[in-house]
């Protein structure tokens, strides 16, 4: 049997194709001008690597903020449930998932069956999301993926006093004008981001083991800072952290079939 | 006009009944809070109109008079007032029941009335924040003062007979609302949360003679065998917290197949509460003010009553059973002090002790970011389905 999970986020579209219990193809693309187009392109790309056509897919679940706009899915589910299910599928010892995406951050608690127990999601604010890192990387003249690695070289990280993305920009500009090293500024940015996420993790009863998913999980600086703040070690997952929501959707597709 | 047309009154500030009332040169008095003695305004031959923020789009004007730390609901109403959308009001009654609403008295007194060619009558009610004998007597005194001020300022006679007649009318209105509340909690509800809020909003925007006629028609409509019913309800929700006058918010909660079957909001179900929350025994029930004091004070579900928390909790638990609630949506307008503390306590007690799942939402009045809200609600429903 063939199943698909499609996750249309704010910055990227993701697709996972599964044959029975095996992930056989996936795709990640930057979002296009509308969620419908993104969903079609990412699905086509993932399928093209398998030789299967959309008609051969037995069940497809959509998730992400654009889930209701995906025209070809059989069902939509929240990305909160999907991230929980995807992470659990890869490591069934995981009980807590921190998903930091492009425009939001979720802290998810699941039980021993991978079922959603509780969650928290950030309020309407860019701080603590991938967008914050994007803005800061841009200010530093770095590509987004560089922000994590460069921060590990820091000896004396700066401290950002404001949580607000807008005010933090002024602070970062100030540090840049004072010729502070990029590594130190990047470390301060990642730490501020981790602090913001850490506050959310304290609002909910989380059990070990922990993992981190979403695009921000690729920023090693944020991950290390969050591990220090939470005093935990994140379990690494065997596939790209951005695909976990789409993977969860595909797992759900199998259960709904 | 069909019975359900009454619901459309919620989407306009000037409904057909109000327009006709104004055309006949009759007066309209605005108010914000359920603890305002509408009955006295009604007995004075005026239309008590609950101020709301319907169709407000921004805070551009209101931002000049209220800070960024003020409630966005109150700010929205001020924006509409400054856009002249409430120019049909002849007066306004403010109480010390919410600090953000309270600011509206100062704004009217020191800004709006001073800059207006047609200043409106201003009334202020001081109401207690505790249930006790002194509070009861205090409210009695305030009602008397309010009645005198209303008579004097607007040159209107209000006698006790008129108040008693009005009390009967208001009692009937509450009974009718209660009857409609029963349709909400049926295994297959006759109406959803959106429609009940629309009815409640419409009910607070017209004279009660008119409202009662419309509510009776609605009851007949819902009672029909072939009348509406909602099948395959995904989850039965209770909605608690700050004021809501915008059905679109509840529409988001109900978008994925859940139904808000009970709400206990001050703009909605609190009007039809069945049993008194608190009662002062040593009082003459023949007093024409008696039913008013009971409604605005003894039945006051508002968290401003500091020693009423356990009574409110008992009522929530009772309502959870009656309405067979699966989960609670606990929402708070940003900077709402009253529901800030109360929601925290409700969350602790209901979720940790009572075991009722809760989704807690902080929101602004204007619905800008509905995608995030939809995700949270959908995840909450998925959680309920698996628990």
Image (cartoon, rainbow, N blue to C red):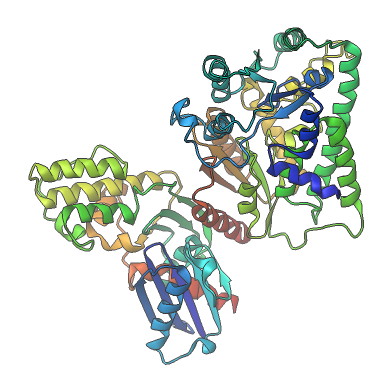
Q: Residue at x 52, y 72 (%)?
A: A70
Residue A89 drawn at (x, y percent): 44, 71
Q: Is residue B175 visible?
A: no
Q: Give the total number of marks visible in the rendering.
A: 0
In the image, B151 versus B297, the foreground residue is B151
Q: Residue at x 38, y 79 (%)?
A: A26
Question: From the viewer's perspective, is A75 left or right of B183?
Answer: left
Question: From the viewer's perspective, is A132 left or right of B40?
Answer: left
Question: From the viewer's perspective, is B313 left or right of B63?
Answer: right
Q: Residue at x 83, y 38 (%)?
A: B178
Residue A12 drawn at (x, y percent): 37, 67
Q: Is residue B168 above or below residue B158?
A: below
Residue B291, located in which quarter of the rendered image? top right
In the image, A211 versus B5, the foreground residue is B5
Q: Is residue A189 visible?
A: yes
- In this view, the residue farthest toward the left is A179
Q: Residue at x 52, y 62 (%)?
A: A78
Q: Is residue B30 above or below residue A52?
A: above
In the image, B80 versus B36, the foreground residue is B80
- In this view, the residue farthest toward the bottom is A51
Name the quarter where the C terminus of chain B is drawn: bottom right
Residue B209 drawn at (x, y percent): 87, 31
Residue B256 drawn at (x, y percent): 63, 60
Residue A163, located in which quarter of the rendered image? top left
Q: Is residue B204 above or below residue B236?
A: above
């Amino acid at each position: 049997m063939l199943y698909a999970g499609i996750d249309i986020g704010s910055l990227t579209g993701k697709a996972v194709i599964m044959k029975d219990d095996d992930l056989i193809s996936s795709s990640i693309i930057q979002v296009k001008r509308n969620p419908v187009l993104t969903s079609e392109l990412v699905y086509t790309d993932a399928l093209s690597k398998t030789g299967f056509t959309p008609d051969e897919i037995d069940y497809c679940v959509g998730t992400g903020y654009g889930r209701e706009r995906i025209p070809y899915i059989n069902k939509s589910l929240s990305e909160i449930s999907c991230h929980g299910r995807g992470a659990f599928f890869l490591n069934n010892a995981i009980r807590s998932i921190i998903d930091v995406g492009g425009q939001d951050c979720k802290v998810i608690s699941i039980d021993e069956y991978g079922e959603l127990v509780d969650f928290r999601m950030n309020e309407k604010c860019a701080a603590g999301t991938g967008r914050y890192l994007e803005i800061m990387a841009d200010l530093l003249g770095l590509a987004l993926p560089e922000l994590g690695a460069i921060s590990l070289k820091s000896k004396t990280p700066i401290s950002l006093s404001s949580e607000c993305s807008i005010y933090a920009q002024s602070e970062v500009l100030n540090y840049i004008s004072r010729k502070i090293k990029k590594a130190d500024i990047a470390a301060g940015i990642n730490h501020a981001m981790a602090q913001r996420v850490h506050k959310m993790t304290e609002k909910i009863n989380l059990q070990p083991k922990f993992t981190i998913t979403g695009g921000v999980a690729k920023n090693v600086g944020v991950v290390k800072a969050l591990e220090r703040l939470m005093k935990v070690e994140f379990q690494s997952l065997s596939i790209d952290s951005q695909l976990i929501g789409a993977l969860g959707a595909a797992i759900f597709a199998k259960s709904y079939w | 006009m069909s019975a359900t047309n009454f619901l459309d009154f919620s989407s306009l500030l000037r409904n057909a009944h109000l327009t006709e009332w104004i055309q006949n040169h009759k007066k309209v008095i605005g108010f914000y809070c359920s603890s305002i003695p509408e009955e006295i305004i009604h007995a004075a031959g005026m239309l008590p109109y609950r101020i709301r923020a319907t169709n407000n789009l921004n805070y551009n004007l209101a931002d000049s008079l209220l800070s960024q730390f003020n409630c966005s609901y109150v700010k929205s109403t001020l924006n509409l007032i400054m856009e002249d959308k409430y120019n049909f009001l002849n007066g306004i009654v403010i109480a010390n029941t919410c600090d953000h609403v309270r600011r509206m008295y100062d704004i009217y007194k020191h800004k709006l009335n001073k800059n207006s060619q047609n200043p409106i009558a201003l009334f202020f009610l001081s109401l207690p924040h505790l249930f006790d004998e002194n509070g009861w007597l205090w409210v009695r005194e305030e009602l008397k003062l309010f009645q005198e001020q209303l008579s004097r300022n607007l040159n209107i006679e209000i006698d006790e007979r008129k108040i008693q007649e009005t009390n009967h009318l208001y009692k009937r209105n509450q009974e009718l609302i209660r009857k409609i509340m029963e349709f909400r909690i049926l295994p297959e509800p006759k109406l959803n949360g959106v429609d009940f809020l629309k009815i409640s909003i419409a009910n607070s925007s017209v004279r009660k003679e008119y409202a009662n006629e419309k509510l009776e028609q609605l009851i007949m409509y819902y009672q029909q065998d072939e009348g509406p019913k909602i099948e395959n309800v995904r989850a039965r929700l209770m909605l608690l917290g700050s004021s809501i006058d915008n059905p679109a918010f509840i529409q988001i909660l109900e978008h994925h197949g859940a139904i808000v079957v009970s709400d206990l909001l001050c703009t909605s179900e609190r009007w039809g509460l069945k049993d008194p929350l608190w009662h002062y025994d040593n009082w003459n029930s023949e007093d024409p003010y008696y039913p008013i004091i009971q409604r605005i004070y003894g039945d006051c579900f508002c968290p401003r009553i500091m020693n009423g928390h356990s009574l409110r909790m008992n009522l929530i638990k009772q309502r959870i059973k009656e309405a067979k609630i699966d989960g609670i949506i606990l929402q708070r307008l940003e900077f709402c002090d009253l529901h800030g503390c109360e929601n925290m306590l409700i969350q602790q007690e209901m979720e940790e002790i009572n075991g009722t799942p809760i989704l807690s939402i902080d929101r602004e009045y204007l619905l800008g970011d509905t995608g995030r809200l939809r995700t949270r609600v959908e995840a909450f429903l998925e959680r309920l389905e698996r628990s």
